[in-house]
Amino acid sequence: MLSMIDAPRTPRVAIFAELLLAAVLTAACGDSTTGARDAGPGDAAAMDAAPSDAGAQDAGADGGAAACVPHGDDGPWLSVTDQGLALGLQDRLRQVRGVAADDFDLDGDTDIYVTNWRDRPMLYVNQGDGTFIEHPAPPTTGFDWGGALGDYDSDGDPDLFVACGGYTDECPNALFRNDGADPMTSLPVFTDVTAEAGVAGPPTESVGGAWADYDADGDLDLFVPCLAGLDETSGLLVDAPDQLYRNEGDGTFTEVAEAAGVAAPGNPRQAAWLDYDEDGFPDLYIPRYAQPNSLFHNRGDGTFEDVTDEMLAEPLAAWGVLSEDFNGDGHLDLLVSGHSTITTGPDGMPVVQEEEHGLYLNDGAGWFVDATTGTGLNDPDDPSHAIRTMGLQTSDMDLDGFLEVVFGNGSTAGGERNALGSFAPGPSGLRWIDRSAVIDLPAPDDGLDPPFPPYPYRTHGMAFFDYDGDGDVDLFVGNGGHGADEPNQLLRNDGLDTGHWVRIDLRGTRDNRDAVGAVVRVSDGPAGASSWEVFRHVHQCSGFNSSQERIQRIGTGACGGPYHVTVRWPGGGLQEVGAVPEGRTTTIVQE
């Protein structure tokens, strides 16, 4: 039986904090089977688990309750194998900019769309047996950069927005409607609806896009960060305003960035939607290169207010951004990757200023705390301390309930080794565990001429997904820099599948169909009757120039199922489902 409580849209902070108060998966978990129930604000106190409880639980009357402890430690970890060459995905002589991974043909497995600057993109269609075939006519603008996935027409399949130009070409962006699989070929069919939808915009240098229902009307809207464009009067290249396309619900969009207050130009590299104050309206964070970053608070009336402070304005050479719950408290945090800026010194010579990454944890009261230093994320003695980051992505590779982050590095000057690490609880809070050695490997040599450029490569788009259906997430890495053709990599996760995970497929009915903006809580019981919990927030556009599938794969470490799942829909309604089995996909349709 399913139950739901419709909570008021505002204020939402207090309601959600009481109902879904987080306990960073450090408490013990028992074997109780859970059923559905209605949640109430009075459950808050019972849900609060103290960090001192980690790894211990008193045995019950039968003496049989086993301790449930997260993996998050420094012990032996998983390994990966590069399957790019074996599966025909290496695409050795291209310059990849973006990656979008989802089930385009709705056959139950994940496909990969890969953009290439100055060359055609590739759409690799998963055959369900661990192999792929290449789509003969993938959607393209001609100068593809980022691919942003979102079901804008609410018909159940992922549509694709492709940003054009990057920071080198001025050209119109494109929106491709997914019309399902061709009955003759079983390949996905895309229709260019850019003109009729009204999202081409003026020719600009665009790097990506991000979908969210910013006006809470039940369909997905689109934000497009723009670098520059041609002035029609002078013919000169000038800073271009960003674009915000409001979905009208009839297949068309209206550009409203200036009226909404988010049009100000500023050399953006990406964008992330996140409801940081939990009032039911997604806010907008924009990382910028060589300029202060921006955080726009959604007022809920169709307009935004710039609330950026000195902390969130950095790093000043940002490329990617992740909005995820890194410390497991149920609130969305920000991780902003740093690159480097080049200025001219007193002697006229170029001066390179490296910018470190920034980790800003949500305090649960409507703002952020700078946790960068305390985690060791930018420790110069740590091999994962990598500057000049372009690609950025996250997932739970070892399915322990805590997130890994991969940094794709490099610059026009050359490639740099990528970095990988885990966020895990420590004695004094969240800590960073370096895993970079796991992915520090060149692509297999195909023996062809010309030979590969030397390793390491320059990484841009990346996406995690389970390509072989074995339960864990694998990593596609898109390589190639400005003037450098480099091989892509598909890093197969060779970790042991414990089965302690669940995939949650949300289907919105009153809220947007993809349930973008929803929060999923997986635990061993409802609020007030659980001893551990893991949170995930639903979105697709992530990192830099990339999109991942919207279905949430949630690992629970040593805690087995069946699970109790609580969904906070974007509009504020709560829905609970008990006895959810582990190791499979469960679909939850909004009531």
Image: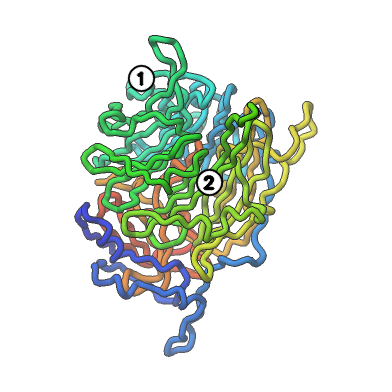
Q: Position of residue 44 (x, y in %)?
A: 29, 70
Which quadrant: the N terminus? bottom left
SS for callout 2:
strand
Which residue is found at the position 63% from the left and 59% from the top?
A: 495
Which residue is found at the position 43% from the left and 40% from the top?
A: 293
Q: Amino acid at mark 2?
A: Gln
SS for callout 1:
helix
Nearest the viewer among 324 and 335 is 335
Q: How is the image coloured?
A: rainbow
Location of mark 1 (residue): 195
Badge 2: residue crowd in 10 Å (few <14, some 14–19, many ≥20) = many
Q: Position of residue 458 (x, y in %)?
A: 64, 36
Q: Is residue 73 left or right of residue 590?
A: right
Is 339 located above or below residue 579 in the figure? above
Q: Does residue 183 appear anywhere in the picture? A: no
Is 408 located above or below residue 175 in the figure? below
Q: Is residue 41 left or right of residue 101?
A: left
Which residue is found at the position 53% from the left and 37% from the top?
A: 99
Q: Which mark is residue 393?
A: 2
